[in-house]
Image: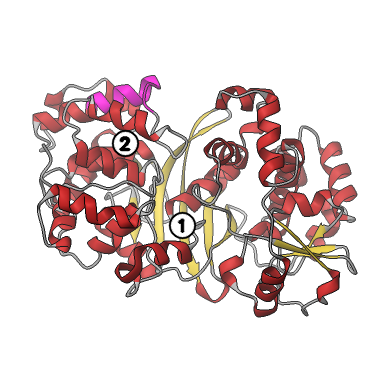
């Protein structure tokens, strides 16, 4: 298990340093409660404080979560913050609800390891077994849903991964010393209307929300996405327990509390845990800005709050990247809107600008290049989009943060019309790979003042393993950041 420095942790607790939010939790022996380091309650005495790497370890030691700072809202860890790639993938799968339908043995099989090795990974880093980690995550998920939503108790239990309401009630009371009903009665947070669900997603500051929105607005898809000064809204298709679900979401900032407010259509309630994690990835909410800014040095000094914008749907983003080859951002925006309007699924939303969901891979896989040409998409890119749709629809290519980076890059470049720039760009955003680096990008070459590839790669070596963040800094302020020289 990773060793925490108690003196440094207590210093961060005394100063309520938000850089450490989610990186450790403090348990107070005199109260039996554990908190985030940013808890506004009176700072406990040093001798009463015990520090844990994860909420699960604090709960295993017999502590219950603070109702004031709400440990369930603490930002998580990025893929590079967790030292083992397999452990990182295991945590991602658990947080997305994989174990709601599968066993720990099936999780280990998915990762290609034994049950024993899976237990060893959790014990080495978190000091808990996978079972304790999962149980803690389920209870914390339930605590958030009870506090922030109007969902019925039976739905809270199911969404949090409990097989029965009786089991849920028993564990909740055993660990938190109050019933789910008592917690809901004590909750004072404002809730969304009955037709909507609202959740809160915390982050570590600084977070440059205007820059994030500007990036997404330039690359938005008409009819599918809408970006305003403060809001990001979109339609979506998401695999549910009984088939694909169409719905909408809206994200807006709450900077005073260092969090985003996520509002979703009611029909998405059955996929909330996975949806919540995908939105965290989209806005890079689990990023720790300090080590990135340190590694990038002068490059990050002007805008330390820049994040790596990911995407909500890897296939949608990859199609958008293909459409953006060798043309302007505005032209790609127009083509993507036409594609969504022609082949997407119609959807009614609270906003007239959002009218459809982006086409599913299966919708595009059966098309002919001539059908895309009618929208103004040249034949070469049409063939690339169809080939990509067929690969994703068949499952041979996975475009998510769980995909193996090197293998996926090779698979992408084996498809017609996808070269190194497109593959690296997809790795940046769909795979959320923090070290992706499209070295042939015109914006990167312009910002670095050279077109010599060897020189660019050599200089970029100093930014590893955060080269994708360096690209965002290099692109910032450029007038046309995705006019590419794709080959």
For residue 323, which quarter of the picture?
Answer: top left
- Does residue 164 show up? yes
Residue 344: image tag: 2
Q: Residue at x 46, y 63 (%)?
A: 291
Quick check: 168 above or below 102?
below
- Does residue 340 show up? no
Quick check: 273 above or below 396?
below
Quick check: 211 above or below 157?
below
Q: Is residue 298 left or right of residue 232?
A: left
Q: Secondary structure at mark 1?
A: strand
Closer to the camera in the image, 149 or 480: 480
Q: Residue at x 53, y 58 (%)?
A: 262
Task: Identify residue for label 1.
Answer: 250
Q: Residue at x 25, y 42 (%)?
A: 320
Q: Which residues are magenta?
A: 386-397
Quick check: 146 above or below 113?
below
Cα–Cα gap, marks 1 and 2: 20 Å
Q: Is residue 326 left or right of residue 216?
A: left
Count of marks overlaid on the render: 2
**Percent position (x, y) of residue 444?**
19, 56
Sequence-earlier tag: 1 or 2:
1
Image quadrant occupied by the C terminus: top left
> Is the C-beta separation of discs 1 and 2 under 8 Å?
no
Q: Secondary structure at mark 2?
A: loop
Residue 345: within the magenta? no
**Percent position (x, y) of residue 58?**
78, 54
**Percent position (x, y) of residue 304?**
39, 70
Closer to the camera in the image, 327 or 194: 327
Q: Could you classify mark 1 by the number of other residues whose Cα lies within 10 Å: few (under 14), some (14-19), or many (20 or more)?
A: some
Image depth: mark 1 or mark 2 in front = 1
Residue 390: image tag: none
Closer to the camera in the image, 175 or 297: 297
């Amino acid at each position: 298990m990773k060793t925490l420095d108690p003196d440094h942790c207590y210093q961060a607790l005394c100063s309520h340093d938000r850089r450490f939010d989610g990186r450790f939790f403090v348990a107070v022996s005199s109260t039996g409660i554990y908190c985030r380091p940013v808890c506004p309650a009176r700072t406990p005495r040093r001798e009463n404080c015990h520090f844990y790497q994860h909420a699960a370890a604090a709960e295993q030691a017999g502590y219950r979560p603070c109702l004031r700072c709400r440990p369930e809202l603490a930002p998580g860890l990025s893929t590079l913050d967790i030292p083992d790639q397999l452990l990182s993938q295991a945590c991602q799968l658990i947080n997305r609800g994989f174990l709601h339908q599968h066993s720990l043995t099936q999780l280990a099989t998915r990762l290609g390891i034994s049950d024993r090795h899976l237990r060893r990974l959790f014990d080495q880093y978190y000091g808990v077994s996978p079972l304790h980690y999962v149980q803690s995550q389920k209870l914390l998920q339930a605590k958030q849903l009870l506090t922030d939503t109007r969902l019925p108790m039976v739905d809270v239990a199911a969404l949090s991964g409990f097989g029965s309401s009786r089991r849920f009630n028993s564990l909740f009371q055993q660990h938190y010393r109050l019933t789910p009903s008592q917690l809901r009665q004590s909750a004072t947070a404002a809730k969304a209307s009955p037709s909507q669900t609202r959740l809160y997603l915390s982050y570590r500051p600084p977070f440059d929300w205007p820059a994030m929105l500007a990036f997404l607005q330039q690359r938005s898809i008409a009819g599918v996405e809408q970006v305003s000064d403060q809001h990001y809204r979109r339609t979506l298709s998401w695999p549910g327990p009984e088939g694909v679900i169409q719905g909408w979401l809206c994200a807006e900032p709450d900077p005073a509390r260092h969090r985003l407010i996520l509002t979703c259509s009611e029909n998405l309630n059955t996929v909330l845990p996975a949806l919540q994690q995908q939105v965290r990835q989209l806005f890079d909410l689990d990023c720790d800005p300090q080590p990135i800014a340190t590694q990038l040095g002068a490059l990050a000094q002007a805008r330390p709050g820049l994040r790596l914008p990911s995407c909500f749907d890897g296939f949608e983003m990859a199609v958008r990247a293909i459409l953006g080859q060798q043309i302007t951002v505005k032209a790609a925006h127009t083509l993507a809107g036409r594609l969504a309007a022609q082949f997407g699924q119609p959807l009614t939303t609270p906003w007239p600008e959002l009218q459809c969901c982006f086409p599913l891979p299966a919708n595009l896989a059966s098309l002919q290049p001539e059908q895309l040409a009618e929208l103004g998409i040249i034949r070469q890119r049409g063939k690339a989009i169809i080939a990509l749709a067929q690969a994703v629809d068949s499952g041979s290519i996975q475009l998510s943060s769980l995909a193996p980076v090197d293998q996926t890059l090779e698979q992408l470049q084996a498809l017609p019309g996808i070269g190194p720039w497109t593959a690296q760009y997809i790795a940046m955003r769909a795979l959320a790979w923090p070290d992706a680096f499209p070295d042939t990008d015109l914006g990167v070459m312009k910002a670095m003042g050279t077109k010599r590839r060897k020189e660019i790669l050599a200089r970029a070596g100093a930014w590893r393993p955060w080269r994708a963040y360096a690209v965002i800094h290099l692109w910032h302020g450029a007038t046309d950041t995705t006019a590419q020289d794709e080959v």
